[in-house]
Image (cartoon, helix red, strand yellow):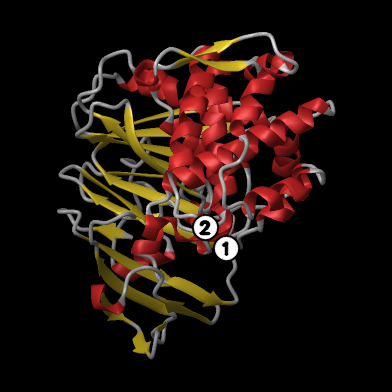
Amino acid sequence: MTPSSDLASFGVSACANQSVTYRPWAAPWSRIEVTEGARVDDTLQPSARGCVAYRVDLVAGRNTLIGTEAVSSAHSEWMLRPSGAIGTVRVGFVLPPGFAVASAWPSAVGAWGTTLGGPDTHRSRDAPLGAEAVASGASRLDASFVLPPLALELPSDVLVGHFEHSTRDVGGTQLQVARVAGTLPHTQAQLVEHIAQAVGMVGSVGGRFPSERILAVVWPAPSDQPVQFGLTKRGGGASILLFFGESAPAGSLAADWVTVHELSHLLHPLVPGADRWLSEGIATYYQEVLRARAGWQTPEQAWTRIAQGFRTGRLGGTGRTLREEALAMHETAAYTRVYWGGTAFALAADMELRARGSSLDAGIARCVREVQRTSRPVPAGRILAVFDEALVPLGAEYGDRREWPPTDDLLERLGVRWSGSDDDATVELVDAPESALRDAIMRPRR
C-alpha cells in the first residue's frame, strides 16, 4: 500500500499464488480506480501474473480522519477484500519520505525477508521486496504486517503520516500510542501512562486484557473535555480512536471516562443491534466502577454518577422495550435510555451474582477465557449464559421492559442515598442491608 503525499488517496497492489478475487468492502467502486486487473461485475479479477492494483480516494467520515499531518483510516475503507482459498495475507507499505505507519496488526518479522513493522523502524530500507511492492514498482518496503484472520472480517484503524509514537507492554498486551500533531495539555508520556492504566484497569476485570495488541490513536479535538469521544474496532488486533480535548484543563485526565468505556467493549464479543443495551450497559457500568477502583474518582463520585445516570435514563426513550430502543437508537436518539437501562441491568446482575458468592467480574473473566472472538454478533442470551446461567432470565426481563427498571430499590438496598438539591445533588453512602456488597463493588481487586 502506498499513500499519496497529500494523504488524499491510497494506492494498493496485491498478488496471490492461488486463485483469489477481490470485492469492495466499504469503499464504493466510484472511489476506486483500477490500474491492474479487470473489473467483472462486483469483483476485481487478477491479471495474468496474478496481481491487481488500484487507487482508492479517501473520504472523511466516521472511519476516516484526514488531517494535515496524518490520516487515520479503517483498512476496510481502502482494502478490497480477497475471497477464495486465502492463506497468509501480508500487507506492505511504501511510504513517502518521513512518513510512518502504525497498526495493531502483528509485525511481519521475517515475512518477505523483512524485519520491519512500525514507525520506529520504517526508515530502514535494506529489506527485499514483497509481492505488493513488486507489483507497484516500488524499490523497498518501509513496513510490513501479517493480517490475522479477523482482519479480513472486521476493520481496524491504520494511521499513516507524521505522528509521535510510543509502545508499552501492559500485562502482556502490546500497547501502541500514536499522537497526531495538535495542541494538547498533556505530554506524550502522560498520555501513554493514562491509556496504559486504562488498559490495565479493563484487563483486571477478566484477568487479562482481551486483545494481545491495541493501537490507541490520539486525535486532538476542539473540546474542553479530557476526551470528547472514542471509537473501538476489533479487526485483528484492537484499535481505539480517542478525541482528546485541546482546551481541557491540565491534570484533568482522571476525569476521562471515555477511554475506559471504549476499552470495556472488548470484554465480550460483538452483539446484535437489539442487544446493544448489554454492551453499552456493561461499558457504562465499568467506566464508573473501574475508575473508582483505580483511584481516578472516589466511590461516592462513582455512585453519584451512576445515580444521576439513572435519573437521566428514566426520562429518555420512546416507550418501547429496551431491545427495541437499542435497535432504533440511532434514529430515535434514545441513547440515555439504552446506555443507562443497560447499566441498571449490569448493576442488578452484579448484585445478584455477588449475593451468591460470585460477581460480574467473574462472569466476564469466563467470557474472556472461553468465547472466541469472531465477526458474527453473539446474542445477549448466549453471552449471559457464559457469564452465569442465572443471568439469562434477568437479561430477558430487562430487554423486554418498556418501563424504567427499579433502580431506586437497587440503590436503597445498597445504601446509596441522594443528598442535596436536584441542581447540586450527590449521594451519601449509609448503612443498609447490602452496603457491604456496595463497598465490594468499588474495592480494588487483589
Residue 22 visible to an observer of this rendering:
yes
Q: What element carries label 1?
A: loop
Q: Quadrant of the C terminus?
A: top right
Residue 217: image quadrant is top left
Q: Where is residue 266 in the image (x, y as percent from the top left)?
A: 57, 43
Q: How crowded is mark 1: few (under 14 residues within 10 Å), some or many (20 or more)?
A: few
Residue name at image x 60 percent, y 68 percent: 87
Foreground residue, 375 or 224? 224
Relative to 165, 105 lies left or right: right
Residue 17 visible to an observer of this rendering:
no
Q: Which residue is denoted by mark 1 in the rendering?
A: 88
Q: In this view, does 107 lie above or below 408?
A: below
Q: Which residue is denoted by mark 2 in the rendering?
A: 320
Q: Is residue 234 above or below residue 195?
A: below
Q: What whole-number distance in Å separates the C-alpha atoms at marks 1 and 2? A: 46 Å
Q: In which quarter of the image is the N terminus?
A: bottom left
Residue 345: image quadrant is top right
Q: Where is residue 405 in the image (x, y as percent from the top left)?
A: 61, 41
Q: Residues within 10 Å of mark 2 (few under 14, many from 20)?
A: some
Q: Label 1 amino acid?
A: Thr
Q: Label 2 amino acid?
A: Arg
Residue name at image x 69 percent, y 22 percent: 413
Residue name at image x 70 percent, y 38 percent: 364
